[in-house]
Amino acid sequence: MNREEELGHGDIEAALATRRELGARYDAELVDGFAERIERTVERRVADQVALVQGRTAGSEGGRIRQFVLGIIFVGVGIPITIVPMVAADNGLPAVVVAWLGIVGVNAAHAAAVNGNRRD
């Protein structure tokens, strides 16, 4: 909102000065004009607040969707990571544990980032 669009004390003084100059017969027009400016200002501020809230909501929804997709991808990747070391090595369990700890770590870090952004 620029300085010309803001309503303030000076606007009220100007409306009262105009009323003094023009007389009581123009009261309705002055009040209507001032009321329209107030309504436009209120509508603009409400629209700005709604856009801000919608932007925050959309951002947190996108984070949840990314987290879900990341989980699905890692489960898909984790299955071959589990099967290959178990079949190829005599004792592939340490490799599987390390791989799954990495998968859990990446998912936890992403979830923490998504939850951190949601609080902003």
Image: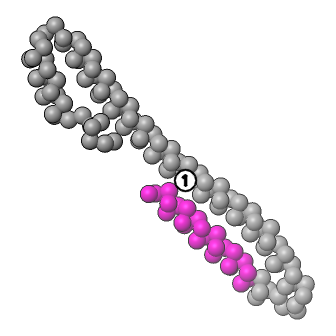
**Residue at point 33% right, 26% down?**
39
Q: Nearer the viewer, residue 67 or 45?
A: 45
Q: Relative to 35, does residue 5 appear above or below in the rendering?
A: below
Residue furthest out toward the front = 21
**Residue at point 84% right, 85% down?**
85
Q: Relative to 56, does residue 14 appear above or below in the rendering?
A: above
Give percent across and percent down for residue 117.
50, 60
Reading the image, the residue beneath label 1 is: 59
Residue furthest out toward the right = 87
Residue furthest out toward the bottom = 90
Q: Main secondary structure of the magenta part?
A: helix
How many marks can you see?
1
Q: Quadrant of the N terminus?
A: top left
Give percent across and percent down for residue 15.
16, 23
State left or right for residue 23 relative to residue 43: left
**Residue at point 9% right, 17% down?**
21
Q: Relative to 88, does residue 62 appear above or below in the rendering?
A: above
* Segment tinted magenta in the rendering: 97-120
Q: Amino acid at mark 1?
A: Gly
Q: Nearer the viewer, residue 49 or 26?
A: 26
Residue furthest out toward the left = 20
**Residue at point 65% right, 59% down?**
66
Q: Quadrant of residue 49?
A: top left
